[in-house]
Amino acid sequence: MWAMDGVMGKASVYLETFGCQMNVADAERAATGLRAAGYELIQQVEEADVVLLNTCSVRARAEAKVYSRVGEVKHGQRKNSQLIGVMGCVAQLEGEAVFDHAPAVGLVVGTRATDRLPLLIERARAGEKQVSDLGEREEGEEWNVSPVERHSPYIAFVPIIEGCNKFCSYCIVPFSRGRERSRPAAEIIAEVEKLKNLGYREIHLIGQNVNSYRPRLESGLENFKGATPFSRLLRAVAATGMERIKFTTSFPRDFHSDIVQAIDENVNLCNWVHLPVQSGSDRVLRAMRRGHKASDYLARVAAIKNSRRRLALTSDIIVGFPGETTGEIGETVQLIEQCEYDSLYIFKYSPRARTPAALLLDDISEEEKAARFAMVEEAQRRVQKSIYNNYIGTSVNVLVERESTRSASDLMGHSTCHKIVNFRGGKDLIGKTVDVRVTEIKVNSLYGELV
Ligand code: SAH
Ligand code: SF4
Ligand code: F3S
């Protein structure tokens, strides 16, 4: 009974996160609020008074996972009084329908209601059945994350923009995350300064489309004539002196050359751009409502490739969009070869209810999607191998994150160009930045020795 262990004091919460970095950042924020309200955060799901599943809905499989996970949690629970809550994108989209799908769930918390979690849990634990909140954030709510809740002691995620206004025809995110809202620049810069003083060595500015950043108040942004707010934010964040700054995801249509200029002029803006293209065919891009043609995209890529330092370029591809022909997937392969991506995330098209593309016939069979996936993967493997080969003999700067999972005498980290790098070294190097000379390449990582 909640009255016995005291709702305000000792209830324990287990929080599990699926999906993208935005969900990770949300979980950090939720945990901060819960601990401040007196909840204990624990790692053992069976022991917890409250289990929160922070969910993703970007493809059908991600969504199905939520319901199977609820079943597992219910099956494993030791306490009958255990409260199961669903938060994140599935919660926002399904709302109270979650209760019908999964009667074991007692709490549904939308993507902008995380700060109200303590109150919502309290209501549910006081006996209220099926508590839900799909509301917006309160006016003036700050992004407040305590260092102990961060996913790493060296790398921090700093959200700069939430939501998405782009409405690509296949994508659920504008529905699950709502309209774009940019955080005030002064608040972002203050957070980065605080992180630097706490000893963080790398930050990732995150958002569905970071380069659509457009704060209502521009205080804190330096005035560079004609430059986009995002490139001005980059310069302002670089001026804090944070050692390594990465940002993701960038939207092609809003990727102006002033971003490349800002990177050129600030060594702490890292050598990596993630610029998802989705398809190499103009017809498919139009059907996807991406707002750019292949040639527009290639012009962006040319600016990136012309930067003073070599910037790594990565992308996302969807295969098997409705009506995609073999010729069109061929155009995608061609574009991949032209762009020479350092790495690629490939997805099989998955229809999402409520999106415009869901009205089109999902006419590419699962086998054919798998075959196209393999074709794109094979093209990327060829491209990637030759790019990785060029790294042999060169030095890359690595932030050491942890021991390698493969070998206890090896360490693992990411380069400024965001590649996984393994090398031999002692644990005392964890949390430091070191130079590593590349001696060997693997499929998705580099291997080297400490310089
Ligand atoms: N805001 C980013 C990423 C959004 S989601 C962008 O605009 O690129 C991450 C990736 O998931 C997308 O880039 C896309 O490749 C993939 N994705 C989104 N919806 C999908 C769907 N319905 N089926 C398959 N892949 C999808
Ligand atoms: Fe989805 Fe497109 Fe928005 Fe990216 S830009 S989150 S793919 S709608
Ligand atoms: Fe998934 Fe929501 Fe992120 S749908 S990819 S968790 S924005």
Image (cartoon, rainbow, N blue to C red):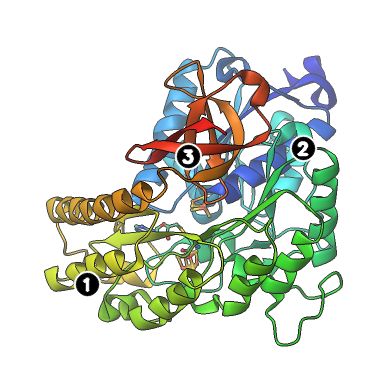
| Residue at image location 50% in from the left, 61% down from the top | 310
Question: Tag 2: residue type?
Answer: Thr
Residue 309 coordinates in the image, percent (x, y):
55, 63
Q: Quadrant of residue 136?
A: bottom right
Question: Tag 1: residue type?
Answer: Glu
In this picture, residue 229 sits left or right of residue 257: right
Q: Which residue is mark 2?
A: 32
In the picture, the quarter occupied by the N terminus is top right
Q: Residues within 10 Å of mark 1 (few under 14, many from 20)?
A: some
Residue 441 coordinates in the image, percent (x, y):
36, 39
| Residue at image location 65% in from the left, 46% down from the top | 25
Residue 30 visible, this angle = yes
Residue 290 visible, this angle = no
In the picture, the quarter occupied by the C terminus is top right
- The answer to whether 403 is drawn above or below residue 86 in the figure is above
The alpha-carbon separation of the residues under discs 1 and 2 comes to 47 Å
Question: Tag 3: residue type?
Answer: Ile
Q: Nearer the viewer, mark 1 or mark 2?
A: 1
Q: Which residue is mark 3?
A: 420
Q: Quadrant of residue 61?
A: top left
Q: Quadrant of residue 205?
A: bottom right
* Secondary element at tag 3: strand
Q: Which sits in the foreground, 6 or 437?
A: 437
Q: Which sits in the foreground, 59 or 263?
A: 263
